[in-house]
Amino acid sequence: MAVLSLSVQVRWYDGACFAIVGAATLASLWVLFLSLKKNKINRDVDVDVTAGVRVAASASASAYRLCHTTASASASAWRGVHPGVLLVFRLGAAAVLTGVLGWDLFIYDPSIFLYYTEWTFLLVILYFLIGAFISAHGLWVYSRQTTHQDVQQANGFLTICINDHLHNQTPLLTLPTNTGGNLQDGSAGTWGYCMQIIYQTCGGAVMLTDVVFWCLLVPFMSSAHFKVNLIMGCMHSLNLLFLLVDTFLNSMPFPWFGMTYFILWSCTYVIFQWILHACGFSWWPYPFLELATPWAPLWYFCMALVHIPCYGIYWLIVKAKNTHFPKLFPHSYVGMC
């Protein structure tokens, strides 16, 4: 029985779907608030402008703060890799993905931006553009170094005792002091925070789009109205491919905490679709978003749960990289900052 009349009828199972998405949103915001509050309480930093910064906190809080640095965003996890390598790769990835998105727009029409895939594709492009900007800044700092010691610092921007971090001891963080104040205390500022948030969001989102497409839509929805073509294949594979290569090269961590951003991203998309339909839009880009069925709450609950393995898979990839690469390449792999 309808309880409200807008452009669509709102039934009990619609309310259940609203509750699922609302609960996921509020839970993510609460976890985000608690994590940031804990991070602030645990912060105990003594700054010495001549010797560097000593971070005295728990290993988890230290690792999370370190991820918001220009070093982790622009330095490679591989010793001897020039800072320009990440810059060139990220610019190339952004160019290729932008070309593919333009191709998609040319073949279809602007309505493709109603799909979650295109939202995520745009987010991945934004990640590489911000990454290229930060890498360019890192390359500029690198070019200013004149001594061998300064070059080593610029290549990593930070010298961190990886062994201490792996054994949950307090790491020593040393910042270069001859950058003319551009890095200040090592914080990447707004751009660094944005890049880290987008990186964690993209890791789960690209897994979700590609898993849903290849494991759900392609096997069970192939028909005369839905056939996989080259552009669809590129849209649901290149995003993950380029992100994995960047993960292989970069030194950024990928904490479980970042799943909150991924969930908020998906909830934002779903709420956007609801607003469109409340305004009279009748077509759903994905059948499992359809509200006019008693099975809708089950679909929404399953899609909420699938966020955990999607993010978890990417977390395991990063975890495997940081666990096995130091053993396989002890003289080449530096690890995350």
Image: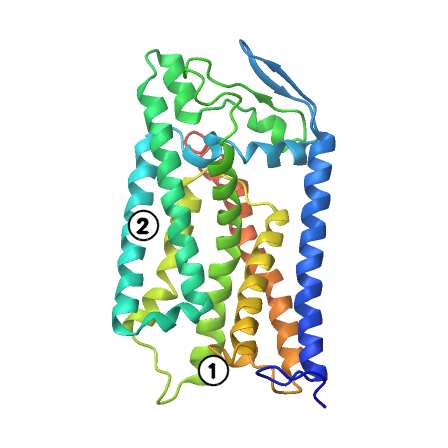
- Can you say whether 111 is above or below 11 in the image? above
- Residue at image x 31%, y 62%? 101
Residue type, numbered disc 1: Trp
Dots 1, 2 in contact, CB < 8 A: no
The secondary element bearing badge 2 is classed as: helix
- Occupied quadrant, residue 156: top left
Q: Position of residue 310 (x, y in %)?
A: 55, 61
Q: Position of residue 177 (x, y in %)?
A: 46, 13
**Tag of residue 283:** 1
Task: From the viewer's side, name the closer residue of 155 and 275.
Answer: 275
For label 2, the residue is 93
Q: Is residue 73 left or right of residue 88?
A: right
- Occupied quadrant, residue 170: top right
The secondary element bearing badge 1 is classed as: loop
Q: Is residue 80 visible?
A: no
- Residue at image x 25%, y 69%? 106
Residue type, numbered disc 2: Ala
Q: Position of residue 333 (x, y in %)?
A: 44, 34
Task: From the viewer's side, name the closer residue of 69 and 283.
Answer: 283
Quarter that holds the N terminus: bottom right
- Residue at image x 38%, y 29%? 138
Q: Position of residue 239 (x, y in %)?
A: 39, 58
- Can you say whether 154 is above or below 199 in the image? above
Mark 1 Cα within 10 Å, few/some/many (few <14, many 20+)?
few
